[in-house]
Image: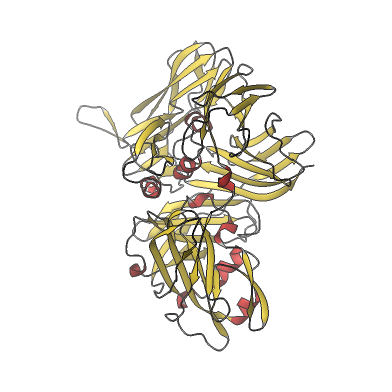
Amino acid sequence: MRLSRPSLLALLAVVACKDGDSVVFDTDTGPSVIGESGIFTDSGGGDSDSGDSGADSGGGDDTSVDDTGEVVSDWDSLRLSPSLIRVDVGATFTARAVLFDDVMGSQDAAAVFAVSDAAVLSVDAATGLVTALAEGSAFVTADAEGLHAEALVAVQADGALTITVVDGLTGAPIPGAKVSYDTTRATADADGRATLTVPVGVPADVSVWVEGGGYIPLSVLGAVPRELTLPLRPDSEEAGPAATVGGEVLFDACPEADWDEAIVGIVGPSFQRAPLFINAEDLLAEDRLIKFYGVDVSIPANLVVQGGAETYETPAHEGDVALWGFAGPMPISEISAGFADVGQAFGAVLGHLDNFRFQALSGLSASASIALDQAVRPEFGFDQEVVVELAELPEGFLGNEDVLVMLLEVSEAGMTLTGLGQGTGTLSVSRAAAEAWPVSDGLYVLAWAEVGGLGTGGGSVMALVPVEAGFATVSDWMTPPTGAELDGASRSLSLTTDARASGARLYLKGNDGSDRDFLLPSGAFTGVVPKEAPKLNLGRTRWDLIAVETPADTYESLLIGGGFAPLSLEANTTRSAGLDATISGS
């Protein structure tokens, strides 16, 4: 069972939601809100906001009996996902039952499933596998821990599939968007809605795009629901941060370097978007060539060296941003050797962190039109620690990889790094002095590992868990993606993600610049890239895959409620697994 702790989504809401936000619609995972910026996010499922400890509770009956003899649950509520779904006769999907509580968070329930009308639906009482038998409507029910939940299923026999196309960042409908199944096309009306006819009872592969560009084309694979809300990501989502932050780094508060040392440091922006969706390359800016003791050394532009490169430059998203930076003495020999990847860069710094100094700056604003010039002066030591318990890395890892652990403070500017550690098992992670970050809306651990080592290009796994009383536990990981293959001739695509994932998003970019997003269910998957969409060159493609686990969603509920919208998905994800690679079509 998956166990989630409360508070994560409430804290992430600080980033995405300001005063004046309003509820615009409810999905299976909770109300969505439109902020003053026009960006919408999902506020999360259940009566509580849920982070993730990733734990397997192993079940157990959290109930008691009151004075009247009635069973009383320790949980507040039980919810079924999807809560409302329209399917064809012959369709199958798995319902997910989740327990919610303000204190305990959320946990998958060992529920007993049933149906209200056995002529319309059947369900496996233990697994929740639902089969649509005949036209009509009926309820799927679930009972667990003394609680009851229901979900309505409408069954049709005509194969009608209705798609609402919306902007992935604002939630606004996109009139004129094109939708297709096989060779059948339709155009979205003023409300962004279009209807296609697809084979009855068969999962549908559909594509959505906007002629003239502006949005990344989208193909949805294996869609069982016959009512979908599909958000298109604007092209800017793959263009990277549009703003630049830079300035001078002042080293006067750092310990003096010995004769064989130099003072080095690193500066970075806060994670303005959810950190579970970043790639290793996002931590370091583009390389620059510097002269270091007469030797040409290539280092990222956000790494600084006293006497060699005392200014930094790093990309950032527009809007509220915080900065973090730390610097201290390191052996010249280590600096001259350079850093082959992110793991090496952070590993080198970690070996000397006790002698480094830190500064964080909040209340800043980044703009694409004017570069933000901000000096950084690291002055605070790392005199605190957080004990982090890490589960053993999952199947697929080689056994010699370390986990990078970041301590992240939450604020309106996102999540800002204030501590760093690396290793496996139980770690004591150094954290900057309390006065370095006086205002915080919570502290989290981001744990991150990659097959072969961070930055080497292998499959990655990430978990985000809260720190409570100086301790944090990552008790489980998703398994990294495997078996990624693409046949350019047959257009066959196959890969395997963790079966526990709520769903996966795959971004493919051809070497000619053509690109497309794909949404697909979790587990072992084999499908065909639809042709009826803007051309995608399949000869050699860049893959950016993210499989996500949310507290309460299923693939079907995400498709129905628009839950694959970038900010909504990021706010609800508690664990992720990814792959960033270039794959040649056979």
Position of 430 compared to 214: left or right? left
328 with respect to 470 (left or right): right
Residue 178 in which image quadrant: top right
Q: Nearer the viewer, residue 238 or 416?
A: 238
Return the x and y of residue 395 as percentages of the image width and height.
61, 49
Extreme residue toward the left, this view: 67
Image quadrant for the C terminus? top right
What number of labels is visible? 0
Q: Residue furthest bottom?
A: 259
Residue at image coords 70%, 33%: 529
Give above or below for 360 relative to 110: below
Where in the figure is residue 271, as x and y percent of width and height?
47, 55
Name the residue located 49 percent from the left edge and 54 percent from the top edge. Answer: 317
83, above or below 90, in the image: below
- Decide if residue 418 is in sight here: no
Residue 393 image position (x, y, % from top left): 56, 54
Question: Residue sitting at 38 percent across and 62 percent down?
Answer: 362
Q: Quadrant of residue 539?
A: top right
The colour scheme of the drawn protein is secondary structure
Could you tell me residue 94's position as x and y percent? 52, 27
Residue 36 in view, yes or no:
yes
Residue sitting at the far front: 369
Q: Nearer the viewer, residue 144 or 544?
A: 544
Question: In this image, 71 relative to 302: left or right?
Answer: left
